[in-house]
Amino acid sequence: MFYFDYVVSPTARRSAVGLPFDTAELRRQLVFVRNGQVVRNDLLPTSVEKPVENELDFEGGKEANWLSCDRAAQFEVTRDSFGTGVLFFQLKAVSRDSCR
C-alpha cells in the first residue's frame, strides 16, 4: 500500500510505486500493489485548508509526504473533527517495521 499526500507530484508517485497507474496533481491518493500489479488505485477527496468529511490522514514514514506499508502493517485509529464538525480519521502506523 502507498499513501501520497497532495503535495507529492505524479512523477514522484510513479517513481515510488515503480508501476504505471493513473494519478493527478494536488490529490491525496492510495495505491495498492499485489504481486507486482496495481490492484486498487484511489484518488481521495482533498482540501489543502482543512480535513474533508471521512478523510483518512496517515502519520509516519521516513519520506516526507508519502508512506509505503506491507501486509503486516497495523494502525492505531483516532477519530476527530478539530471542533469543525467535519469528521476525519488519523491513522498512525504502530508496526513501525511494516511502513517506511
Image: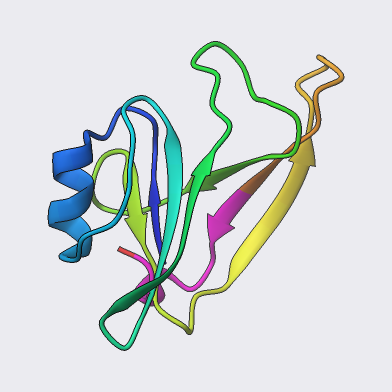
Quadrant in which the N terminus is drawn: bottom left
Report the side of 71 relative to 81 (left or right).
left
Quadrant in which the C terminus is drawn: bottom left
Residue 10 pos. (x, y %): 22, 39
Residue shown at the point (31%, 27%) measured from the top left: 25
Residue 65 pos. (x, y %): 32, 39
Residue shown at the point (14%, 41%) measured from the top left: 11
Report the side of 29 relative to 24 (left or right).
right
Residue 96 pos. (x, y %): 41, 69
Residue 27 painted magenta: no
- The magenta segment: 91-99
Query: From the viewer's perspective, is residue 64 above or below residue 63?
Result: above
Query: From the viewer's perspective, is residue 33 above or below residue 68?
Result: below
Outermost residue on the bottom side: it is 35
Outermost residue on the top side: it is 49
Residue 95 painted magenta: yes
Residue shown at the point (26%, 35%) measured from the top left: 8
Query: From the viewer's perspective, is residue 31 above or below residue 58?
Result: below
Residue 55 pos. (x, y %): 66, 37
In this rendering, the count of numbered labels is: 0
Residue shown at the point (22%, 62%) measured from the top left: 17
Report the side of 81 relative to 43 (left or right).
right
Question: Observer-nearest residue: 22 or 68?
Answer: 22
Report the side of 94 relative to 69 (left or right).
right
Query: From the viewer's perspective, is residue 79 above or below residue 6?
Result: below
Q: Quadrant of residue 39?
A: bottom left
